[in-house]
Image (cartoon, coloured by chain):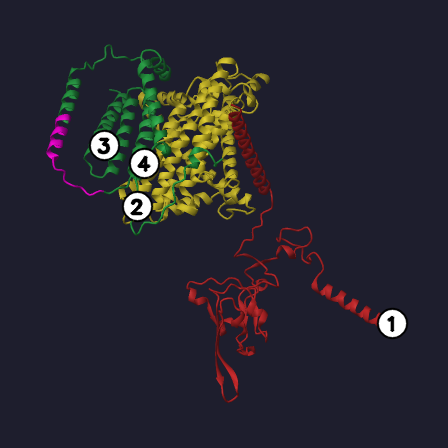
Amino acid sequence: MNSGIDLQGTFIESLQDLGLTPGLAKLLWMPLPMGLMLIGATIGVLIAVWLERKISAAVQQRIGPEYAGPLGVLQPVADGIKLVFKEDVIPAKSDPWLFTIGPAIVVIPVFLSYLIVPFGEKISITDINVGIFLWIALSSIAPIGLLMSGYASNNKYSLLGGLRAAAQSISYEIPLALAVLAVVMMSNSLSTIDIVEQQSGYGILGWNIWRQPVGFIIFWIAALAECERLPFDLPEAEEELVAGYQTEYSGMKFALFYLGSYVNLVLSALVFAVLYLGGWESIIPIENLGALFGISENAPWLQVIDGALGITMTLIKAYFLVFTAILLRWTVPRVRIDQLLNLGWKFMLPVALVNLLLTAALKLTFPFAFGG
Amino acid sequence: MFNVLKQVTDYAKESLQAAKYIGQGLSVTFDHMQRRPVTVQYPYEKVIPSERYRGRIHYEFDKCIACEVCVRVCPINLPVVDWEFDKKSKKKKLNHYSIDFGVCIFCGNCVEYCPTNCLSMTEEYELSSFDRHELNYDNVALGRLPYKVTQDPMVTPMRELAYLPKGVLDPHDLPAGAQRAGRHPEDIAEELRAAQAKEEESKEEKVN
Amino acid sequence: MNIAEGVQVVSFFILSATMLAAALGVVLLSNIVYSAFLLGGVFMSMAGIYLLLNADFVAAAQVLIYVGAINVLILFAIMLVNKREDFSELPGRWIRKISTAVVCAGLFVLLGAMVIVTPWAIEPPSTAVVRETTVVIGKHLFSDFLLPFELASVLLLMAMVGAIILARRDFIPEQIQERETALTLPERPRELDALEGGTGK
């Protein structure tokens, strides 16, 4: 494997050539990936919102947003601007402090989780060795924010919605973690980059989706439940609970919830792509292509193309998953709360455990295919 | 032992069946995605209501004989007929007539039973107002004729599905003289007249 | 002192200050919901201190288990048990107060002695960065910490069995009889067939 492009190294080196100390150069580099992550996540959300509206419209034989920009691409931006300028209402009998902190606690962990998503071998914010475990840990903070905003609204629908959201996300965290654990067991590492590397080399045939056919279904169901997408959107079931924990929110605080839910959806799709669809790997193995045409692996333009291709492949896979989530939204009716908990505890948990045991057994029997 | 096995297989079968049904549902929604949108861009384009459209009721004050049949056939006795007996002419004299369209269900019974045809259905359906009491139309408001969609310069009129040529589903950009599919009422009337004439001829021949 | 060390010191002081403030808030605030939320803050700042000690896996596990599970369960318990009781003076309250004070003071003295006696300095200050923390933790769990590990699993199993028994009401005879007043409606007997797996599929 070639080392690929090392943006951080080159940036720091070029700053050092300008006469800065290494520490200062590193300090100047640090905010760049953070800002890029925030901007990237926000743009990803804008695209996801536009896709949601356009695909929903197509499924219902409508046109969808059309007037704001070409094909209505600026509609999410218009929505965002509207929400920014709306009055920020804090209900009179609510708890103003908790009411304000709640949305922030929901949104911050979701954005933090973008740290671990790799778009290429060197194109990631950090390569921490607890990688995917950090994502699971951070996503468990969100229920606290939901409970907080549900309680602080001083509204029975909000409280019910918050409690439902917390119950749902703690019960689906376990199958999710077990499904991830099976993948981790095969790649011998929690780091997302190692997980992708383990799937590389054979194109589409090397992806984990073939080795974990049960795991990927469990992961996707649990991820939908964690994102509170239909058919698991009980916490904000509008027929029963008005809008759940969001009922009393307006303006920017509501926008934070809205943003958080879509960031979470895109993030889950990205993590799914990394865990089961080979991350930045293309359908056909590309490394051999350079050798086929007799080009050196270290040619800079080839590396640039490689990096761009990696980012494109990851995004294509992730947005394909977002598309299936949207299509699923208009296909499947919402489950009841007892069906939800039954599915989580009586179906997904045992199946995920069996999947984990089977993976361990297969790893011992066929170490060449299941990562010895 | 076998009981447990059977339970397990049944459960697995049910799960697979559920997965199959979800797959079928997904294929239906995916199929719908490729269909042509049916959107009519409402304030700029409007569908032309059909001849039998049951919109806001039109009322002619001068034709009304204050018989109150409309009140009797109305499911909720909605029309208000305010009349007094004029002793000189020994006739009912109508003072006011009103229908509250906030309550009316547009069933058309009053129009059906009116002996003098002073009530009729129009094609007006845009009845929104800021106050529900504004929907209580008196005889002057009831006597106003609605704007026709086809005559409004701001609006592009769109034909309904049944009024499109054969095989066309999109009302946009129809060719100028496009006629709807099937026989038109005037054609049917013509045919009937011709058939009647023929019958009479044959009858005459028989008599002769 | 370079930038990295400066960042470490500053974040250590910020984390300790927030942890102490939040812990004091947990104890001193009268609103129990605030206490529960502040407990989450304490756990989070502890996770931050673990991160400063290069224990990334322990930090993530702290967040997952203490914030994501235990704190949420505490909040659940507070929000579901919505029983308002009037505060009543107990006759022998001063005995309880004094005994609590004695226990607290004893704990404080014990912990203080522990802080003073323990030799904190590790020699030589280990600079070795453990790359794969999970592997090291796993090896420790299955070698020198095997007994506590297995005991913890037995304890969890017992807790699970207890929870199942509490959840399945048919094991516990129902003793509580509602007093009939003129205003209570005749209630249907609670059906347990769903639990016994008889009729429900």
Element under disc 2: loop
Q: Which amino acid does label 3 sit on?
A: Ala
Crowding around mark 3 (Cα neighbors within 10 Å: few <14, some 14 to 19, many 20+) is: many
| Residue, disc 2 | A154
Marks 4 and 3, how far apart at CA: 20 Å
Are the residues under marks 3 and 1 on the same chain? no
Q: Is residue C87 within the magenta segment? A: yes
Q: Is residue A216 visible?
A: yes
| Residue, disc 1 | B206
Chain shown yellow: that is A
Tint applied to chain C in the drawing: green
Magenta range: C85-103
| Residue, disc 3 | C22
Are the residues under marks 2 and 4 on the same chain? no
| Residue, disc 4 | C76
Which subunit holds the residue at mark 4?
C
Q: Is residue B39 left or right of residue C139?
A: right
Are the residues under marks 2 and 3 on the same chain? no
Q: Position of residue C154 (x, y in %)?
A: 34, 20
